[in-house]
């Protein structure tokens, strides 16, 4: 079963159980997937669906920061709940040791020696860790590794 099929099944379950907030989020997610499919005239595979989910999580994290500045605890709680639901579709997250091993492998295979080679290393790591790691944190680890 593809990730998109699993999300559709979750939508049906949310409809049956009357979870209006979760249903709205899943519909929004499926609409974002469909929008990207229409825009690019392709059918998204699981990796591409994961990138849509990661984008939605990133948007919600930015919203949480803004709502906290505005003192809107009710909206912060709602966004955090949506982050939790969306995170449920991501694969198990890699630990720091696993990330460092992936980075070392990518540095070795690309022959990267300086920060100028960060793009090559990032591309390899991103392909292997898609959805399983926060790419901002990965970027910081790569930068630290290449700067040392």
Image (tube, helix red, strand yellow):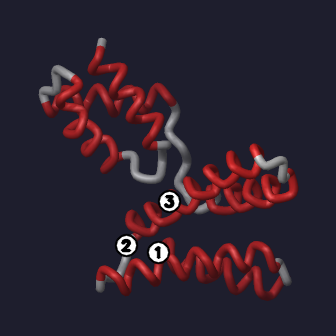
Mark 2, residue position: 45
Q: Nearer the viewer, mark 2 or mark 1?
A: 2
Label 2 with label 1: CB-CB less than 8 Å: yes
Q: Nearer the viewer, mark 3 or mark 1?
A: 3
User: Spatial distance from mark 2 to mark 3, Cα to Cα?
Assistant: 16 Å
The answer to which quarter of the image holds residue 102 is: top left
Q: Earlier in the sequence, mark 2 or mark 3?
A: 2
Q: Where is residue 82 in the image (x, y as percent from the top left)?
A: 71, 62
Q: Position of residue 131 (x, y in %)?
A: 46, 53
Q: Looking at this view, is 61 or 52 the one in front?
A: 61
User: Spatial distance from mark 3 to mark 1, Cα to Cα?
Assistant: 19 Å
- Tell me the element at label 1: loop
Q: Where is residue 37 in the image (x, y as percent from the top left)?
A: 38, 82
Q: Which residue is drawn at 55% across and 53% down?
A: 58
Q: Earlier in the sequence, mark 3 or mark 1?
A: 1
Mark 1, residue position: 2
Of the 4 image quadrants, the one containing the C terminus is: top left
Residue extending farthest front: 70
């Amino acid at each position: 079963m593809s990730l998109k099929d699993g999300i559709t099944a979750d939508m049906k379950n949310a409809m049956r159980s009357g979870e209006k907030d979760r249903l709205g989020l899943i519909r929004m997610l499926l609409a974002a997937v469909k929008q990207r499919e229409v825009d690019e005239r392709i059918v998204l595979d699981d990796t591409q669906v994961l990138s849509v989910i990661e984008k939605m999580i990133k948007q919600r994290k930015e919203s949480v920061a803004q709502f906290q500045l505005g003192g809107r605890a009710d909206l912060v709680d709602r966004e955090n709940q949506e982050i939790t639901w969306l995170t449920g579709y991501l694969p198990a997250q890699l630990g720091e040791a696993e990330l460092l091993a992936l980075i070392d492998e990518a540095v070795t295979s690309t022959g990267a020696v300086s920060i100028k080679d960060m793009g090559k290393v990032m591309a390899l790591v991103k392909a292997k860790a898609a959805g399983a790691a926060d790419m901002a944190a990965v970027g910081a680890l790569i930068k630290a590794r290449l700067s040392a």
